[in-house]
Image (cartoon, grey):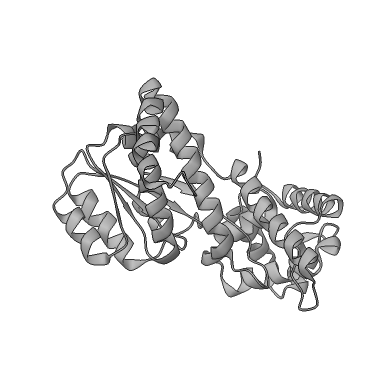
Amino acid sequence: MPLPLFSRIRLHSNRFTQAHERIVNYIKDHVQEVIHLPINELAERCQVGDATVIRFYRLLGYENYHTFQIAMAKELIEDDVQPIYEEVENHDLFPDVTRKVIASTVQGITDLAGQISPAAIQDITVHLRAASVIHVIGHGASGIVAQDVMHKLMRLGLRINAYTDSHLMTIAASIAQPEEVFFAISHSGETTDILRTLELAKNQGCYTCAMTSYSESNITRLVPAYLLTCTRDTKMRSDTMISRIVQLVVVDILYVMLALQIGEAASERVTQSRLALKQYRDVNR
């Protein structure tokens, strides 16, 4: 499924110039007009040159201005049918807040279909399954996702560690063996400690991969395979809030793909872990 225009804008937003930002802001405020504007008039209204508009839509993956306008019109039509990413306003009551938060989250998950590369999923799952040890690394909210990766893949019988401490992940990478894998979770793709750890792991001959929200980030240039979790921020919710939920969905996709590859042994291991955890439940309550 093709990635929607505004999701593409979000994916590349960390690399936009000030001129690109002017184009984005104008499109957001005048989208119904822009779908009818010739390229020279759009450039004039955004106070940029025609060449800047051309570089902008090519950066987003559109071959020409016509396909760019078609993508804009398509998103506008879909938004008219089913509004997405509605802003939560100060006067909104609980039902409106609930509906808008759920809608923006659902849309973020839906957009995954056009973002995740099947080739990347295949490459990453193959290496995760074959690894002698998997090291998942992440800071802050990404560290929480890293813990979830460890929790799920451990149940499949894979040897895995999760690190949220810079010193520990650095030590692990510096002494790693080539058959080990380092999987980084980084919303921005620019966290210095995460990048340094991946570089150390690569120097040790390890396979590295990542999950991030920006296709044009330093982490995507560093690893051979990565998974995108682009989301759009709203007034009351930052993109990092929605992206954390989307990242957890991607973790579930990886988990299921690995379980299918492992086969019956995966089901047996999951059952064993469930039985082992039963002792911590008070059945009399």
Furthest-bottom residue in this view: 90
* Farthest front residue in view: 284
The residue depicted at 77 percent of the width and 51 percent of the height is 75
Residue in the foreground of this view, choosing between 24 and 165:
165
Horizontal and vertical percent for residue 249? 53, 46
Q: Residue at x 79, y 48 (%)?
A: 74
Residue 220 showing in the rendered view: no
Determine the image quadrant of residue 87. Answer: bottom right
Q: Can you say which quadrant of the picture contains the N terminus?
A: top right
Judging depth in this view, the residue of 97 and 15 nearest the camera is 97
The residue positioned farthest toward the top in the image shown: 264
The image shows residue 204 at horizontal and vertical percentages of 17, 48
On the image, which quarter does residue 27 sit in? bottom right
- Asked whether, in this view, residue 215 is left or right of residue 134, the answer is right
Q: Is residue 185 visible?
A: yes
Q: Tell me if residue 259 comes above or below residue 7 in the rendering.
A: above
In the picture, residue 114 is in which quadrant?
A: top right
Instruction: Give the percent coordinates (x, y) of residue 139.
Output: 37, 64
How far across and down, in percent of the image, does residue 28 sit?
75, 67
What count of labels does the image hold?
Answer: 0
**154 relative to 126, above or below:** below
Q: Is residue 243 above or below residue 130?
A: below
Residue 197 or 91: which is nearer the viewer? 91
* Left or right for 152, reference 234: left
Q: Is residue 230 left or right of residue 149?
A: right
Q: Please, which residue is most extreme toward the left here?
A: 175
